[in-house]
Image (cartoon, helix red, strand yellow):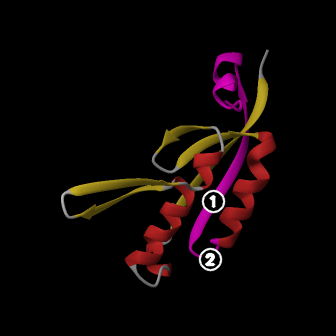
Amino acid sequence: MKKKAILITFSVKTESFSCKYERNKFFRQLYGWKQIIRKREKRYVYERKGVLSRIPHIKVDESVFIVAEKHFREIERFLQEWEDKVMWEAFEVLLDEPRLKLLEEV
């Protein structure tokens, strides 16, 4: 049995970002990042969550991923905030049961 999911593809308009920091901000908000702080002899590592850190997804390629239909609205809202700097499209796709399980909550 196959069920629907949403494939999202995006491309950044590099020239639209005011600086590299702003472009990195987009990617960090989407994917999250690892922050490492060194103090004296110690090293502290913090996992900073992004939108996709909270949403089960299948990464297809560098800027292509699949989410369950129920999570699409959250991704859509995020991408709409960046729509003047990021081009994106969403497509319905059919997934088989094993791949669909990858999109379920843990």
State yes or no: residue 100 in magenta: yes
Q: Quadrant of the N terminus?
A: top right
Q: Quadrant of residue 81?
A: bottom right
Tell me where the magenta segment starts and ends, as one range. Answer: 82-106
Residue neighbourhood size for the residue with mark 2, other residues' Cα within 10 Å, grouped as few (<14), some (14–19), many (≥20): few
Q: Say whether residue 74 is left or right of residue 7.
A: right
Q: Say whether residue 39 is left or right of residue 5.
A: left
Residue nearest the observer in this picture, 101 or 86: 101
The total of numbered circles placed on residues is 2
Q: Give the vertical position of 86 relative to 96 (above or below).
A: below
Q: Position of residue 49 (x, y in %)?
A: 55, 54
Q: Position of residue 5 (x, y in %)?
A: 74, 36
Q: Say whether residue 76 is left or right of residue 83.
A: right
The single residue placed furthest to the top in the displayed view is 1
- Which SS class for mark 2? loop
Amino acid identity at mark 1:
Trp
Circle 2 is placed at which residue position?
84
Amino acid identity at mark 2:
Asp
Circle 1 is placed at which residue position?
88
Q: Quadrant of the C terminus?
A: top right
Residue nearest the observer in this picture, 5 or 106: 106
Q: Position of residue 29 (x, y in %)?
A: 55, 62
The residue that appears at 41% across and 76% down in the rendered structure is 21
The residue that appears at 78% across and 32% down in the rendered structure is 4
